[in-house]
Image (tube, rainbow, N blue to C red):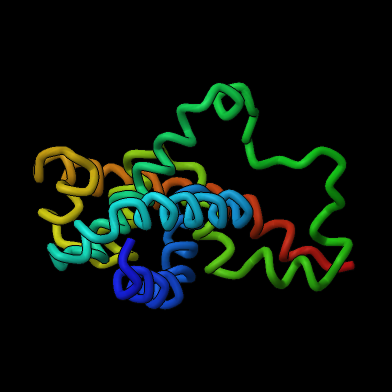
Amino acid sequence: MRAEDDASYREFARAKAMSLRRLAYLLCGDWHLAEDLAQTALIKMYRAWPKVQRKNTVDNYARQVLLRCWLDERRKPWRSAENRDGKVPDQPGIDLDPALAGSATGTRDLLLRALTQIPPRQRAAVVLRHWADLSIAEVAAALRCSEGTVKSQTARGLEALRAVVERLDAEIAPVAGRSV
């Protein structure tokens, strides 16, 4: 790679690494996996940097590469065998620690927990549409599907997200209302 291409890639990677990591976290719900996904996406982008840079579609390409990395990661055999029901064995009750009770009732934590419980395609559509603020056409290009599919996946994802948030909120409300 030419020196000026290498320098422009380094500048891009410095500027976009954290936003790619945050987007990856919203897709997968795990900060460690999000870091790995962002790093993998940046490595893949480095290989194609001269072509991508000339087309001026760097941000869109980065999101698409990140999305593909996440989908590839989900297909790996050890991911399908893993039981990710969101419940950690032998976890202490929320009402025992006031600091945990305050953070567990937060809207942000509730939303992030709920995002991990909706189907992957719906999660991707919701995150790309409402977090990354992409248009329907851009999400369709990233997910390699039609615009109608994006609309239906987003609508179903938001409906599923509402249902999960209501269920989680109902689970937390009785615990938060207890007095010690």
Q: Is residue 61 above or below residue 122?
A: below
Q: Position of residue 11 (x, y in %)?
A: 39, 77
Image quarter in which the N terminus is found: bottom left
Q: Is residue 111 above or below residue 142?
A: below
In-image side of 96 versus 135 (left or right): right
Residue drawn where x is 31% and y is 53% of the image? 126
Q: Position of residue 103 (x, y in %)?
A: 69, 69
Quick one: 128 or 44, which is closer to the camera? 44
Image quarter in which the C terminus is found: bottom right
Q: Position of residue 127 (x, y in %)?
A: 35, 56
Q: Residue furthest front?
A: 2
Quick one: 173 or 159, which is closer to the camera? 159
Residue 7 falls in image quadrant: bottom left
Residue 14 falls in image quadrant: bottom left
Quick one: 18 or 11, which is closer to the camera? 11
Residue drawn where x is 64% and y is 50% of the image? 171
Residue drawn where x is 84% and y is 68% of the image? 179
Residue 166: tell me if it is visible: no
Q: Position of residue 138 (x, y in %)?
A: 15, 56
Residue 5: tell me if it is visible: yes
Residue drawn where x is 48% and y is 56% of the image? 38
Q: Is residue 155 above or below residue 22?
A: above
In-image side of 76 versus 97 (left or right): left
Q: Is residue 54 above or below residue 4?
A: above
Image mark count: 0
